[in-house]
Amino acid sequence: MYLSLKESADFSINIKFSDSLNQFYNIISELLNLDITQDMKKPLLWIAENEADAENCRAVKSPLINNIFKYRFKDKFYFLKRPAENNNKLWYASSLQQILLAISFVVHNELIPEGGIPIHSLVLEYKGQGVLLVGKSGSGKTTSYKKIQPPWKALSDDHAFIVKKGNKYRLHPFVTISECLETNNPIPRDLNFFVPLKMIFFLNKSEKDEVILINQSQAAYEFYNAAIALIKFYYKNFTTNPELKSFRTNIFNNACDIIKSVPSFQLNASLGGRFWEKIQERLDYDI
């Protein structure tokens, strides 16, 4: 059985499951709103449960990819990592988490050569416009996610794909992968859905709410770091491996191009304030 994005999607992702993992067809399809098909000539991702499947496809170990992705062959990826504890509930949660990681891995490798990047950030929507709140761990992204109020919508508190379309950029929210182990029931995120990327805000804890201008060079550097915060999880020695130099360069160039094209600011947000109103003032001025 195979899963794929809708025909009108911004990018492609075709997934093949081994027969022993058929319980995940409908789960992943519903979670990401993917189409179920019976046949596909070229899956970008093949998810299997045992190494014999990989051997049948002449899989080779990649020195660049971390252990969660045990094999790489051509443009397909085989993945399997069972938890040490023999627990069906844990196995289910762990497998779901790893399947989503594998999908994320393949998607961002599709996007980067085309000018896009994955980004570790909070994704908000206001009047059909997409806003990114970028910040390091502990900067308040999750707290901000929980505080947001209508007419704002919080689309993701963790992970999004930025897709380049012409000279514009689109935001595709992705599932919060940690929810799989925490609740066994992550919130669905339609991978076909997008909002245009309108503004980027770099989140900073403060005693008062305010939006201030940010130096473009500083913004590009922080934006690049937010992208590789996700990417280096997948690759061994990402920041130093010479074989990944061109890959790192592409990500940096894409981050710089996005910052040049999309207005960026620093957002100082207080613990008890209404930071979104400061963003709203800026958006209403520009919309």
Image (cartoon, grey):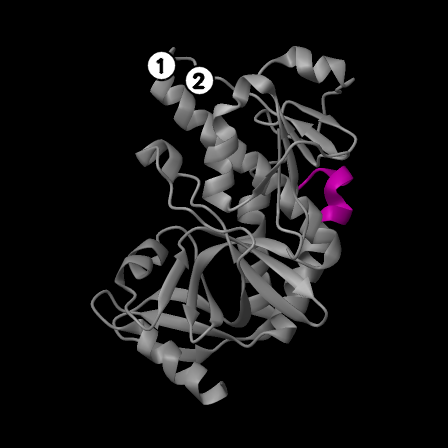
Q: Residue at x 59, y 62 (%)?
A: 221
Dot 1 alpha-carbon crowd within 10 angstroms: few under 14, some 14 to 19, many 20 or more: few
Along the line of sight, the residue nearer the viewer: 173 or 178: 173
Q: Are marks 1 and 2 in contact (CB under 8 Å)?
A: yes
Along the line of sight, the residue nearer the viewer: 148 or 44: 44
x%, y% of residue 165? 69, 66
Q: Residue at x 44, y 61 (%)?
A: 123
x%, y% of residue 50? 60, 13
- Mark 2 lies on residue: 83
Provide the residue span drawn in magenta.
Answer: 239-247
Q: Residue at x 70, y 32 (%)?
A: 39
Q: Residue at x 52, y 37 (%)?
A: 100
x%, y% of residue 274? 26, 73
Query: Which of the 4 quarters of the picture holds residue 207?
Result: bottom left
Name the secondary structure under disc 2.
Answer: loop
Q: Amino acid at mark 1?
A: Asn
- Mark 1 lies on residue: 87
Separation of residues labelled 1 and 2 (CA atoms): 8 Å
Q: Amino acid at mark 2?
A: Pro
Residue 253 shown left or right of residue 191 in the figure:
right
x%, y% of residue 136? 43, 54
Query: Which of the 4 quarters of the picture holds residue 153?
Result: bottom left
Query: Which of the 4 quarters of the picture holds residue 85?
Result: top left
Name the secondary structure under disc 1.
Answer: loop
Dot 2 alpha-carbon crowd within 10 angstroms: few under 14, some 14 to 19, many 20 or more: some
Residue 41 shown left or right of residue 227 in the figure:
right
Q: Residue furthest bottom?
A: 285
Along the line of sight, the residue nearer the viewer: 71 or 76: 76
For the stretch drawn in magenta, the main secondary structure is: helix
Residue 159 falls within the magenta-colored stretch? no
Viewer-nearest of discs 1 and 2: 1
Residue 232, visible in the rendered structure: no
